[in-house]
Amino acid sequence: MNPDVQALLARQSPAVAETAWRAVGLILDLYPDAVVTVDGGDIGFGSSTGYKGLVFVLSPHTSWVTLGVARGATLPDPEGLLQGKGKVHRHVKLHSAADIDRPALRAVMNEAVERRQ
């Protein structure tokens, strides 16, 4: 794994780090060829190191991890997991590692990977 990711997550609380690591695992399971980058406090997953190829962003916070989904505004989301009011992107707040096991989350993420540019 990218040493910058390891360093970033090592600075988080155990619960937030566990949630983030589980999210990283799911992202890489669904998108194994993702280019992983760290920019400040965010971990990006995409086809390149730039914004244009971005598919997911993980942002650890004090009590949760935000999973950003690029172009999430156009994805099917029948359970209403995606939050945000932007014209393009959406996010999901992951409050615990158990949140990552939701089938609806996996479905949204699968669709995001399938639609990547």
Image (cartoon, helix red, strand yellow):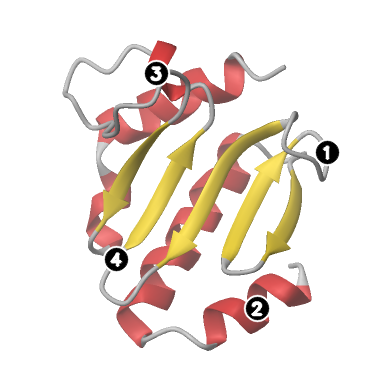
Q: Where, by quadrant of the figure, is residue 48 drawn?
A: top right
Q: Nearer the viewer, residue 112 or 84?
A: 84
- For marks 3 and 1 on the same chain, the one whose residue lies earlier in the sequence: 1
Judge from the rendering whether residue 12 lies leftward or rightward of residue 41; answer left or right.
left
Q: CA distance from mark 1 to mark 4?
A: 26 Å
Residue 84 picture location, percent across and down: 29, 33
Q: Nearer the viewer, mark 3 or mark 1?
A: 3
Q: Nearer the viewer, residue 6 or 40?
A: 40
Q: Residue at x 26, y 73 (%)?
A: 63
Q: CA distance from mark 2 to mark 3?
A: 30 Å
- For marks 1 and 4 on the same chain, the one whose residue lies earlier in the sequence: 1
Q: Which residue is mark 4?
A: 64
Residue 16 picture location, percent across and down: 35, 74
Looking at numbered disc 1 in the image, what kind of residue is underneath it? Ser
Q: Which mark is residue 6?
A: 2
Q: Residue at x 30, y 27 (%)?
A: 85
- For marks 4 and 3 on the same chain, the one whose residue lies earlier in the sequence: 4
Judge from the rendering whether residue 62 lies leftward or rightward of residue 26; answer left or right.
left
Judge from the rendering whether residue 56 lies leftward or rightward of residue 2; answer left or right.
left
Residue 88 picture location, percent across and down: 47, 21
Q: CA distance from mark 1 to mark 2?
A: 20 Å
Question: In the current view of this chain or complex, which residue is farthest to the front?
Answer: 86
Q: Secondary structure at mark 2?
A: helix
Q: Nearer the viewer, mark 4 or mark 2?
A: 4
Looking at numbered disc 3 in the image, what kind of residue is underneath it? Ala
Q: Which residue is mark 3?
A: 73
Q: Residues within 10 Å of mark 4 (few under 14, many from 20)?
A: some
Q: Is 57 above or below relative to 39?
A: above
Q: CA distance from mark 4 to mark 2?
A: 17 Å
Q: Secondary structure at mark 3?
A: helix
